[in-house]
């Protein structure tokens, strides 16, 4: 399969704003598991129990490798995180198992332009804003995804390179399915190969994962995020903004705006992670956004 970057440039430096990759797999797999098969119903989710590495626990983003088998139409994918296995064997909803939903972990990404060439592996990034995972004292979480249509596959057959499989998983390890209307839910599904889904998780050492400036400007918000073309700046006339500018992950200033502060056109930027710095009479703040 050919792999392309759909929505983000990966950041692997652990020195940029205290960012650290806390879970990583190889990305060589050519086989996938269908996330939400039609036969299992629209609530079906597929996922993986993992153990986080490193020390950063303020979640920044989770990136997964997907592909379409016979449908290239747009779709959405929703990620949820659980403290442990979210399902039991047999028919049952996600969350009916021993694991509980981690509050604030549900994130939906709209994939508006999946690769037209079927079988092409692409990356989808789920952005988080400092979701605190420090309460997971065993460093274990279960990462689950639901797709809005069938024929969306998540690459598996990978090996963890940062972090690990949970204690007790042997051999190829296990995958998890929940929410199926059938009796094929379970915490220990096995596909006959390394059952580790392709995934990268990065986090920050501190809570300032998307706001690196003066918290006196904390009422400013950016939306939509991720963004395709126009990034709106929600201010509600609270602050006296004077300048806004965009920098890339290397700290290079690539855009500046000094006349209009309600939105900024980022359609000409390549896909990746950027930072919008807002200078106001009340202070300065820098917020992260993702350009799709």
Image (cartoon, helix red, strand yellow):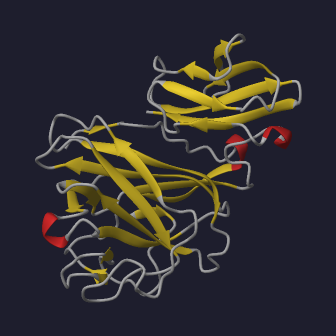
Q: How many marks?
A: 0
Residue at the spot x=20%, y=69% of the render? 41
Residue at the spot x=27%, y=70% of the render? 44
> Along the horizontal axis of the image, is 209 left or right of 162?
right
Q: Residue furthest top?
A: 259
> Along the horizontal axis of the image, is 29 left or right of 275?
left
The image quadrant where one finds the C terminus is: top left
Residue 242, given in percent of the width and then of the height, sits at: 79, 17
Q: From this viewpoint, is residue 202 visible?
A: yes
Q: Residue furthest left?
A: 70
Q: Quadrant of residue 198?
A: bottom left
Residue 95, given in percent of the width and then of the height, sits at: 42, 80
Residue at the spot x=25%, y=89% of the render? 90
Q: Quadrant of residue 110?
A: top left
Residue 281, given in percent of the width and then of the height, sits at: 88, 24
The image quadrant where one finds the N terminus is: top left
> Along the horizontal axis of the image, is 14 left or right of 68?
right
Q: Quadrant of residue 256?
A: top right
Q: From this viewpoint, is residue 27 visible?
A: no
Q: Is residue 185 above or below residue 282?
A: below
Q: Closer to the camera, 228 or 17?
A: 228
Q: Is residue 79 above or below residue 15?
A: below
Residue 211, given in percent of the width and then of the height, sits at: 72, 42
Q: Residue furthest front?
A: 236
Q: Closer to the camera, 248 or 152?
A: 152
> Along the horizontal axis of the image, is 149 left or right of 229?
left
């Amino acid at each position: 399969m050919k792999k392309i970057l759909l929505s983000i440039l990966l950041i692997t430096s652990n020195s940029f704003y205290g960012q650290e990759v806390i879970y990583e797999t190889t990305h060589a797999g050519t086989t996938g598991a269908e996330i939400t098969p039609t036969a299992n119903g629209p609530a079906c989710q597929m996922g993986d129990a993992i153990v986080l590495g490193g020390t950063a626990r303020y979640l920044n983003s989770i990136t997964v490798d997907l592909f379409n088998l016979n449908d290239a139409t747009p779709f959405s994918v929703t990620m949820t995180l659980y403290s442990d296995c979210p399902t039991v064997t047999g028919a049952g909803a996600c969350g009916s198992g021993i694991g509980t939903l981690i509050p604030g972990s549900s994130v939906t990404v709209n994939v508006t332009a999946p690769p037209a060439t079927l079988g092409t592996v692409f990356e989808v990034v789920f952005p988080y804003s400092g979701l605190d995972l420090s309460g997971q004292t065993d460093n274990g979480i279960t990462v689950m995804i639901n797709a809005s249509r069938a024929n969306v596959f998540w690459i598996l057959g990978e090996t963890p390179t940062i972090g690990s499989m949970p204690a007790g998983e042997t051999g190829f390890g296990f995958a998890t399915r929940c929410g199926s209307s059938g009796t094929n839910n379970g915490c220990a599904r096995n596909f006959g190969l390394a059952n580790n889904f392709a995934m990268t998780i990065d986090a920050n050492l501190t809570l300032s994962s998307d706001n690196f400036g003066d918290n006196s400007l904390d009422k400013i918000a950016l939306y939509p995020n991720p963004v395709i073309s126009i990034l709106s700046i929600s201010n509600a006339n609270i602050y006296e903004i004077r300048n806004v500018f965009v920098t890339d992950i290397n700290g290079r200033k690539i855009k500046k705006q000094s006349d209009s502060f309600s939105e900024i056109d980022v359609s000409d930027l390549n896909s990746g992670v950027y930072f919008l710095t807002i200078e106001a009479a009340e202070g300065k703040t820098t917020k992260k956004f993702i350009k799709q």
